[in-house]
Amino acid sequence: MALIVQKYGGTSVGNPERIKNVARKVAKFQAQGHKVVVVVSAMSGETNRLIALTKEVATHPDARELDVVVSTGEQVTIGLLCMALHDIGVKAKSYTGGQVRILTDSAHTKARILNIDEAPIKKDLDEGNIVVVAGFQGVDEHGNITTLGRGGSDTTGVALAAALKADECQIYTDVDGVYTTDPRVVPEARKLDTITFEEMLELASLGSKVLQIRSVEFAGKYKVKLRVLSSFQEEGEGTLITVEEDQNMEQPVISGIAFTRDEAKLTVLGVPDKPGIAYQILGPVADANIDVDMIIQNIGHDGTTDFSFTIPRGELDKTVKVLETVRAHIGARAIEADKTMAKVSVVGVGMRSHPGVASKMFRTLAEEGINIQMISTSEIKISVVIEEKYLELAVRVLHKAFGLESA
Ligand code: ASP
Ligand code: MG
């Protein structure tokens, strides 16, 4: 007998029929002798609808009240799922985040979980209940309702699994696992049986939206066995996210290719080459809450240098405004904005032991005449910034070059 936490996302509980389907799935697990805790998201589209409502009544909705509103989506689903379970003769009990006492800090709309009181859940499980917990929400020390950020139900699932010392945390979603890349771009993309936490973290932060990044961090930290599976298929092992040391098989060099569109590149030309300049440029950008990604400073010539960085494209106008002030202040020559950039990254722990990944990546792109504008690397990742129009081509040729279509 195992203790399993199962998380079902918005699409999986998107309408009453699907909720009944989840009830049947969950009941089946329990019938096999397992103890099951279920975490659910709001029905698909619901969180967006609630956020839109708040914007109709206020230009800048208060963060505390925003959490009061958006946390209701999940409350609906937990009640409905329990009713559906009762309807097929299964004992079930629902809990909101506050009722479990998923204690968080007070950072409304992006709160972090501090502690979970698992005792009541354990008692309910021992009494034969399926316990259904609202994802995405918690309560701070003053009793205020908090939410964990978009996609936060994944983190609720993992945190509960950690607190309950569950045997596995299963994330049921609308895809049947983690893929080598987005199958919409590369039809030959392959589902991975396993991937390491580190790789998953890179892929999640690089725009592969299967799991909320914080949930992956959490699972890695507390060694929660995490699995991604489809809620619409009866069979299938999904993708298991593992601790690297657990794997005795030879690792492929590259596990996946992630990409993001909608990037923009800014260059400050003719910046005086002296200490403090990077701070003077990026300080105001950070103060304006603009998320900077890749940064490059060239070697100086004649006392000046060029300074480039990338940002989300939607922030371009705002950033240019900030930079205009900075430019005047530091005496830089000009600002150049390039708004149709994309980023492609190859990720794999095998990179540590296999040299030549970067050169293979660059050669592959060169053969297609794709110009690389910026490069950044980590121990298990190489990212390049290219023109967006070459993005799909780049992903396809790299997928092939690294042999990702065959196991
Ligand atoms: N319902 C929340 C959202 O849409 C949380 C989640 O689904 O994980 O972001
Ligand atoms: Mg989600």
Image: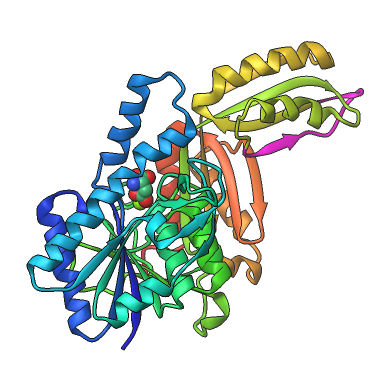
Identify which residue is drawn at 58% across, 56% down: 360
Instruction: Give the left or right position of residue 14, taking residue 152 as reference.
Output: left
Identify which residue is drawn at 57% across, 50% down: 105
Q: Position of residue 60 (x, y in %)?
A: 46, 22
Q: Which quadrant is the C terminus positioned in?
A: bottom left
215, 138: nearer the viewer:
138
34, 338: nearer the viewer:
34
Q: Position of residue 206 (x, y in %)?
A: 51, 48
Main secondary structure type of the part rendered in magenta: loop
Q: Which residues are magenta?
A: 293-305
Residue 288 visible, this angle: yes
User: Does residue 333 lie above or below 233 as drawn?
Assistant: above
Instruction: Give the left or right position of residue 340, taking residue 326 as reference.
Output: left
User: Does residue 34 lie above or below 45 as drawn?
Assistant: below
Residue 222, by quadrant, is: bottom right
Identify which residue is drawn at 16% across, 66% down: 23
Task: Tell whether position 373 is magenta.
Answer: no
Identify which residue is drawn at 59% across, 56% down: 381
User: Does residue 241 lie above or below 47 as drawn?
Assistant: below
Q: Position of residue 389 (x, y in %)?
A: 43, 32
Residue 211, by quadrant, is: bottom left
Residue 400 visible, this angle: no
